[in-house]
Amino acid sequence: MTKGLLALAPDGLTSRARRFVATQGVRLDVRPVEDNRRWWHERGVPTEVIDRMAAYQDRWGGVVLPPAPEYDGGPRYFDPDGPEADESGWWFEAGAQRTAVPYSFLIGPRGEFGVQAEANHWAPLHASVEGWVEALALAHHAAAHAARITRFTGDEVDGVGLGDCEPVREVRGLADTWWRGPDCLVGLWTGEAVSLDFPRGRVARVYSGLDDWGLYGGVRPEAG
């Protein structure tokens, strides 16, 4: 069941991202993590991992946001599931795929948000799910205000100059990053290239012709 537009976005986001979540998001009812706690305990999932999943669900569970520019839109909605462990720690699903992409969206052992195509093909996109949400909000903001959007793929990405750009820190970028120039924003997506071992999967978008509002949306660098 849809609970309607979010009256209040989670804390810890910039004002731009909070506006995005509050005006563009809806929240669905999802099955509580607590319903599966005993089942997961019986299968060796530590209490602290289940607690992490419960905290993630309390904050983000059931939230549906507009599609991301890449990864065929990202998760359909946020909903933790499928905890698994390897030598680096415990992982869990961030939410089911929106479309039939050949990887899963995961929350890593240190809270990273990323994609994994198969064992040992993990691409942490952002240092947290909040970073993913910030990047998604920025992409929609930039697309709405840019005079021109130019998309580059594969080796073309190497020709995108970032010399006069500064990193957009609030996106907490890892494999995916955002950069701000004098009149443009540049988004770089490399998660598919890493997780699928497919260098031609790199993507850059240059959002050009932006004024001050388009560049910042009311969020100055110190907010990140």
Image (tube, rainbow, N blue to C red):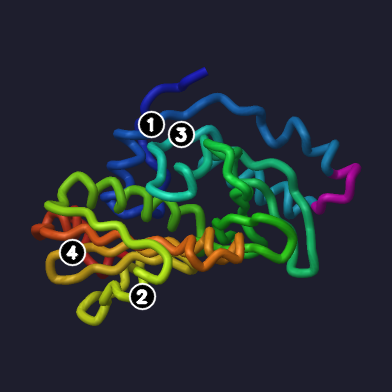
- Residue under label 4, please give it: 184
- Mark 4 falls on what kind of element? strand
Disc 1 residue type (three-letter): Leu
Q: Nearer the viewer, mark 3 or mark 1?
A: 3
Instruction: Please provide the residue range marked out in magenta.
Output: 41-46
- Mark 1 falls on what kind of element? loop
Magenta includes 131? no
Q: Nearer the viewer, mark 3 or mark 2?
A: 2
Q: Is residue 27 above or below residue 146?
A: above
Camera-side residue of 135 and 67: 67
Q: Is residue 103 above or below residue 77?
A: below
Question: Which residue appears at 44% of the width and 54% of the height?
Answer: 132
Q: Upstream in the sequence, badge 2 or badge 1?
A: 1
Badge 2 crowding class, 10 Å Cα cut-off, few under 14, some 14 to 19, many 20 or more, is: few
- Residue under label 3, please give it: 64
Q: Nearer the viewer, mark 2 or mark 4?
A: 2
Residue 110 % position (x, y): 62, 64
- Residue under label 1, please give it: 6
- From where the camera sits, is residue 146 visible? yes
Q: Upstream in the sequence, badge 3 or badge 2?
A: 3
Q: Upstream in the sequence, badge 3 or badge 1?
A: 1
